[in-house]
Amino acid sequence: MGKKLSPQELAIYRAVDEVLHYVWDPIGVSTVPYARDEYHGYLPKVFDLLIAGSAAEAIAAHLSQIVTERMGLSENLGHDLAIAKILLEWKEVIGEKHK
């Protein structure tokens, strides 16, 4: 990452990690313990988008790009938009806790 995260940012980073692995999970590895780090390469950019205040549509577009261009899977924009909204909700909840 390169910089020290504040407690709020660290909580958001961890939430993004959990959501990507257990909820987004486009290749279906959430129940495989050895695959726990499968989506870590995508985590920093998704986190950056979230912290920068990107809209759900922009986050969903990024997730869709990962799915189609990096994983070679079919796009599921509805699912990716739902994930983006979950991420934004987590950011809001964590922000409220750290006021």
Image (cartoon, grey):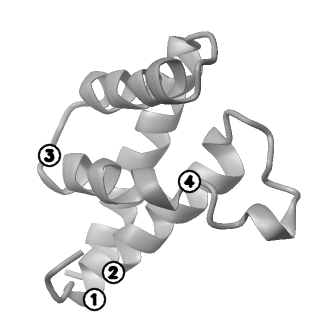
Residue for badge 3: 53
Q: Residues within 10 Å of mark 2 (few under 14, many from 20)?
A: few
In the image, residue 27 lies at what x, y percent? 73, 36
Precedes in sequence: disc 2 or disc 4: 2
**In the image, residue 15 above or below residue 55:** below
The secondary element bearing badge 4 is classed as loop
Q: Quadrant of the C terminus?
A: bottom left
Q: Nearer the viewer, residue 50 or 91?
A: 50
Between the C-alphas of marks 3 and 1, the distance is: 18 Å
Do the numbered discs 1 and 4 sit on residues whose CB atoms are within 8 Å? no
**In the image, residue 10 above or below residue 90:** below
Between the C-alphas of marks 2 and 4, the distance is: 17 Å
The secondary element bearing badge 1 is classed as helix
Residue type, mark 4 in image:
Tyr
Residue type, mark 1 in image:
Pro
Q: Report the mark closest to the observer, 1 or 4.
A: 4
Precedes in sequence: disc 1 or disc 4: 1
> Residue placed at 42% from the left, 48% from the top?
87
Residue type, mark 2 in image:
Leu
Q: Is residue 35 left or right of residue 69?
A: right
Residue for badge 2: 10
Between the C-alphas of marks 4 and 3, the distance is: 21 Å
> Residue placed at 11% from the left, 50% from the top?
52
Residue type, mark 3 in image:
Gly
Looking at the rendered structure, which numbered label has been put on residue 7?
1
Q: Residues within 10 Å of mark 3 (few under 14, many from 20)?
A: few
Between the C-alphas of marks 1 and 4, the distance is: 22 Å
Q: Which quadrant holds residue 8?
A: bottom left
